[in-house]
Amino acid sequence: MIIEMKRVRGGVKPPTRSNPSDAGLDLYFNPHHEGFVVHPERDAATVEPGQSVLLPTGFRFGVPHGYMLEIKNRSSIAAKRSLVVGACVVDSGYDGEVFVNIHNIGRETQVIKPGTKIAQAVMIPVVHFRALETSAEPYDWYPITISERGDGALGSTDKK
């Protein structure tokens, strides 16, 4: 699938795919800056432990109807630097710049320099649905599952 993407300003590094079989496109930190000159130290982002920041990618994406871009962790930045991506869904109706919500879950301050790979964008099909409210017992009117799990939550399948 080919989709449109557009730079929102000059001097930004475009997304890349490191290997043909990779699920997502790597996104880079492309800060807003004066002119086209990026200063790696001055334009770096600092993320304190427990802090969340929105990092600009410098691009807009034309996500087709019936799909979404999900912005996901890069395993290396998550494992090595304790930087994880928050809930980032780019809907087909959104046409603004894509930002990456980065959380520092570690104990050390992290500095992200311009041009650093910060996340990956994965194209995912969307099943549009409508929820119908009912007063009946859950799912009495239509069996949606073959499981006996019921309302068991975290760890409930490990209990005998």
Image: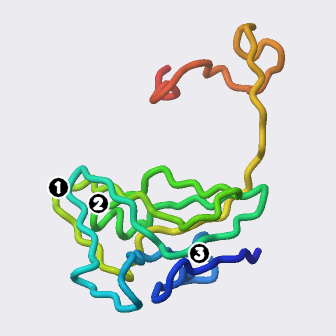
Q: Which mark is residue 82?
A: 2
Q: Position of residue 96 (x, y in %)?
A: 58, 64
Identified at 48% across, 50% down, the residue is: 87
Residue placed furthest toward the bottom: 37
From this view, report whether residue 135 is shown above or below residue 113: above
Name the amino acid type tagged 2: Ser
Residue placed furthest toward the top: 136
Name the amino acid type tagged 1: Arg
The local secondary structure at tag 2 comes to loop
Please state if 142 lies on the left or on the right of 10 as rendered: right
| Quarter of the view holding residue 67 | bottom right
Q: How many marks?
A: 3
Q: Position of residue 113 (x, y in %)?
A: 29, 78
Q: Earlier in the sequence, mark 1 or mark 2?
A: 2
Between the C-alphas of marks 1 and 2, the distance is 8 Å
| Quarter of the view holding residue 106 | bottom left
Identified at 39% across, 76% down, the residue is: 32
Task: State the colouring used for the structure image.
Answer: rainbow
The answer to whether the residues at label 3 and label 1 have Cβ atoms under 8 Å apart is no
Give the quarter of the figure containing the N terminus: bottom right
Q: Earlier in the sequence, mark 3 or mark 2?
A: 3
The answer to whether the residues at label 1 and label 2 have Cβ atoms under 8 Å apart is yes
Q: Position of residue 68 (x, y in %)?
A: 67, 58
Please state if 51 lies on the left or on the right of 129 as rendered: left
Between the C-alphas of marks 3 and 2, the distance is 22 Å
Residue placed furthest toward the right: 141
> Which residue in the protein does label 1 denote?
107
Q: Position of residue 17 (x, y in %)?
A: 57, 81
Q: Residues within 10 Å of mark 2 (few under 14, many from 20)?
A: some
> Which residue in the protein does label 3 denote?
22
The local secondary structure at tag 1 comes to loop
